[in-house]
Image (cartoon, rainbow, N blue to C red):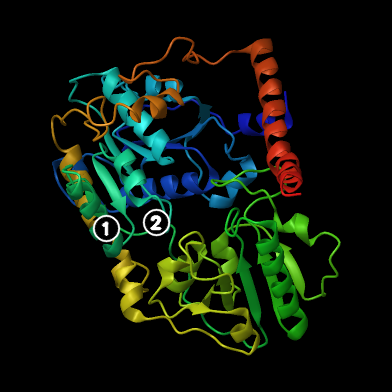
Amino acid sequence: MGRESARLSSFYGVPSRTDSRLRIAVLADSDTRWKWGALTARRLAERVPEGDWAASRPAAPELDGFLLRGRATPTPRQLAEVGVSPDALREVTMAQFLDIAVKFDDERAYDVVVLALVGGAAQAALHGLAARRPGHTRRPVIVTGYVGVVYEKLADGLLLRHGADVVLANSRHDAERFRAVYEGVGADACAVTEAALPFLGGAAYQEEPGRDTVVFAAQPSVPESRADRQYLLRRLVDHARRHPGREVVLKLRSKPGEHTTHIEEHPFQKLAKGMDLPPNFSLAYGNMGEILDRTDLLVTVSSTAALESLHRSVPTAVLTDLGVREALGNHHFLGSGCLASWDRLDAGHRPTPDAGWLAAQGVAPGEAYHRAFDHVRERMSELLSKESLPPIAPYYTAATAPGYLPGILARHHLAPDGTPLPGAAPANEPTGLRRLVRDAVRDAARGAYRHGVQRVAPVIRRMGEL
């Protein structure tokens, strides 16, 4: 068995259905989406309003995690970094998950399914669930949403998520945009529910005598080019040299060989090899919240870490050095008061965020955030208390998108009607020698893919530019 599969197998478990706890399944396709999905599940069950349904349920939910098999399947280290331990965790194909999730009538039935997926996978799951029990009204409440800042593919991503009972918006700003998209195509917008990012929290920032730490939050694909990433790294290292009494930390998303939501062709740790790094410069992994506990200035291009930082009142700078562009995502921070260049930061500038912008984005500190999930819990209580739910009805169908939907579903081995294609992975996992062989082949394939992305592809691209 390959090392990655051996490590993942220690996380696997069989769900136990022996109590009346709220039963939630989270299907995620990457480390960041697992973080969002798992923490969203916990938020949903924290303080459900009193009622007939809520009175019969203990507060702590039973949480089962499912990792959608693919290039970005997270490793145990990435999962542990989130700090959420599910009752059971399995790696599955879409077909396997659908077979598990549609057991609506037995004691293993889920009350809630959280789809923490990229848009196409969410659409496939919605159609697959709908096809497994057409017209069946006793089913889980389906919840989906976005991991962080929504700065690209707004219409595409939203329409692919349509059909869920609850589409979470991370702020008032997002909720208004989401409803406008659905209403603009004539789709039902009642599922859009305002909430907040589930992973905000931690102690408010306080200066600590003798501590002066600047953290740059790296992103796997922003910026994308090698030249731009080398520029940012050089400026970060130069900042460390200019301020020898300051600790300068490069916070990395993943270790070499690991994949995240987005492909990282030029890892910063690889670019840093061979550079003359000053002693006050270091690389760091780990939970972002723990890093922020000792941060005095958070710098990024457009990472969601900026929202975590702003929520805790940590001084936060969003870089303008490479322009303020949609491709970078830093245009999302227009009006925030946080846009700044390395030249200004080198000179000692510390941005002051705009309070109105913070409130609109759902990251204002204080009681407002603690109440941000109340509307969602009320909505969940209402849905869970119903004896039946309407059939899952995505906006995209064979009638509305006949040239788009079949391709989306085929990528997850589903036919245009949501049923499994011939040859789709069987529901039962192989055992014994068959599993050993399968895991070894899968590890080799993932390793080859990651090697191709991070080593071969850049070489081919450079050759093509000659």
Total tally of numbered discs in the picture: 2
Query: In front here: 222 or 349?
Result: 222
Where does residue 425 sit, x and y in percent of width and height? Answer: 50, 15
Residue 214's quadrant in the figure?
Answer: bottom right
Tell me the number on the disc at residue 177.
Answer: 1
- Up-down relation of residue 261 to residue 112 (above or below): below
Mark 2 or mark 1, earlier in chain: 2
Which residue appears at 61% of the width and 55% of the height? 224
Label 2 CA crowd tier, 10 Å (few <14, some 14–19, many 20+): some
In what element is the residue under mark 2?
A: loop
Q: Give me the residue at 25% from left, 33% from top.
A: 394
| Mark 2 lies on residue | 150
Viewer-side residue, 386 vs 361: 361
Determine contact: label 2, label 1, CB under 8 Å.
yes
Residue at left offset 52%, top offset 82% = 206
Q: Amino acid at mark 1?
A: Arg
Q: Quadrant of the N terminus?
A: top right
Residue 406: % across, % down: 36, 24
Spatial distance from mark 2 to mark 1, Cα to Cα? 10 Å
Q: Position of residue 160 (x, y in %)?
A: 33, 39
Q: Amino acid at mark 2?
A: Val
Residue 416 quadrant:
top left
